[in-house]
Image (tube, rainbow, N blue to C red):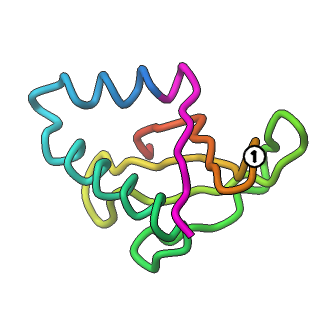
C-alpha cells in the first residue's frame, strides 16, 4: 500500500529550511529518500521506525519516529502518525537529533 504524506506547517518549514540550506545538501538528500520510503513502506528496515512513547497525536494517535540518517553528525529524525484518513501519514516534525 502506498501512503499519502501530509505535512504540518512546522514540518513543511523544517523541510524547506533544510532544502534551502546549501550546507545541508547531504541531509536534504537523505530526507527525500526517507520520505520516499515512508510512502512505500513505513516499516522499511533502514528507517528503524519505532513508537515514540512520550507524545501522542492530536486525537491520541501513536507517534512514530523514523531515522533519516544514521551514524553521522546532525542526523535528522521524522516524527509522524498514521491518519487522519486510511492510507495517510501525517508528518508533524522534522528535527536534527541532538
- The answer to which of 48 and 72 lies nearer the viewer is 48
The x, y position of residue 88, in whole percent, is 64, 49
Neighbour class for label 1 at 10 Å: few (<14), some, many (≥20)? few
The x, y position of residue 43, in whole percent, is 55, 74
- The answer to which of 6 and 58 lies nearer the viewer is 6
Would you place residue 34 above or below residue 91 in this image? below
The x, y position of residue 15, in whole percent, is 36, 31
Relative to 36, 80 lies left or right: right
Residue shown at 56%/67% (left/top)? 49
Dot 1 falls on a residue whose secondary structure is loop
Residue range of the region highlighted in magenta in the rendering: 1-11
Residue shown at 57%/70% (left/top)? 1
Q: Where's the C terminus, which quadrant?
A: top left
Q: Which residue is mark 1?
A: 85
Would you place residue 67 above or below residue 73 in this image? below
Quadrant in which residue 67 is drawn: bottom left
The x, y position of residue 68, in whole percent, is 37, 56
Relative to 40, 57 lies left or right: right
Amino acid at each position: 500500500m502506498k501512503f499519502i504524506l501530509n505535512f504540518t506547517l512546522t514540518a513543511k518549514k523544517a523541510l524547506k529550511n533544510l532544502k534551502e540550506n546549501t550546507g545541508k545538501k547531504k541531509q536534504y538528500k537523505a530526507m527525500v529518500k526517507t520520505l520516499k520510503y515512508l510512502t512505500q513502506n513505513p516499516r522499511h528496515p533502514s528507517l528503524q521506525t519505532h513508537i515514540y512513547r512520550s507524545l501522542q497525536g492530536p486525537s491520541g494517535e501513536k507517534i512514530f519516529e523514523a531515522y533519516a540518517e544514521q551514524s553521522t553528525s546532525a542526523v535528522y529524525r521524522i516524527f509522524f502518525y498514521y491518519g487522519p484518513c486510511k492510507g495517510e501519514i501525517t508528518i508533524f516534525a522534522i528535527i536534527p537529533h541532538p
